[in-house]
Image: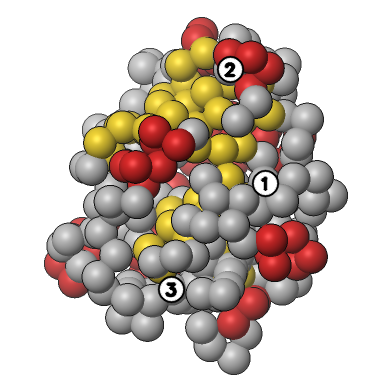
Amino acid sequence: MKRIKWFVAAAVMATLFFGCKAKEQTAEPPPPEQPKAAEAPPAAKPEAPAPASAPAQPEAAASPSAAVTKQGYDRALLRASMLKDKAPETFQVKFATTRGDFVVTVNRSWAPIGADRFYNLVKHHFYDNASFFRVVPAFVVQFGISAYPPISAAWENANIKDEPVTQTNKRGYLTYAKTSMPNTRSTQIFINLKDNAGLDGQGFSPFGFVDAQGMKVVDMLYDQYGDAGGPDQDQISKQGKPYLDKGWPKLDSIKTATLIGAAPEAGKP
């Protein structure tokens, strides 16, 4: 699910509902390509979008500093099949972005498989330096293709199984991008910019949310390239961030995504 063109081609829903251009299904505006995850969103890889892996407390799970390569990423990310820690029942992740910070609260009970995958990716800083490559106004914001090609290659076929949709795709909720094929969620995730209940029946299962304050930041992410004029997901995977910086320099990106602890009040929105 790598091409989610912007959560629209012959397989508009085949790309995570977020306009993944090649791989994950994206929802279109009413489901722009389904949030796809690397071709393998979209939570089916929208994709998603989304939106893996006995775990240490989120606070203690900060990125392992011992295995960072000279390129700046955690070497553990090159072994996708080994990252299978179980996530805490609730945890929060702070996203520091080029537009400001926002916090994602995850409820493992909503979608255990998706929550575990997200926990492991964040724990090893998979999302650091990644761009919000698909932003469809009044629909979704999609991200989840690594800034580093070696990592994208390692996760290309690291899909996770689908799971029941226990929460509706409301504004602020996070879901994996995926394709129209079963069990295609991987690393791509989308954030719903509005209530997208239509995605529920397509198998996009939310696993967390951004609160109202955080959505003020999400709403400001650069969205003027348009879904059709956005980058090619396959090329993002193959070339990494330099490809985006050259052709779509105004796209916002994630500086760091870090585990910050358990969610307050049982992780309720």
5 or 7, which lies in front? 7
Choose the circle earlier in sequence order: 1 or 2. Answer: 1
Q: Quadrant of residue 228?
A: bottom left
- In the rendered image, is residue 130 in sight? no
For residue 57, above or below residue 222: above
Question: Residue shown at 53%/88% (left/top)?
Answer: 9
Q: Secondary structure at mark 2?
A: loop
Q: Residue furthest right?
A: 164
Disc 1/disc 2 C-alpha distance (Å): 16 Å
Mark 3: which secondary structure? loop
Q: Position of residue 212 (x, y in %)?
A: 45, 37
The disc label shown at residue 206, or none = 1
Residue 6 tag number: 3
Q: Which mark is residue 263?
A: 2
Q: Name the amino acid type tagged 1.
A: Pro
Kindly report the distance in space between the C-alpha atoms of the residues bearing marks 2 and 3.
31 Å
Q: Nearer the viewer, mark 2 or mark 3?
A: 2
The image quadrant of residue 133 is bottom left
Q: Type of residue at label 3? A: Trp
Name the image quarter holding the C terminus: top right
Of residues 202 and 152, which is closer to you in this image?
Answer: 202
| x 38%, y 76%: residue | 227
**From the viewer's perspective, is residue 11 above or below residue 191?**
below
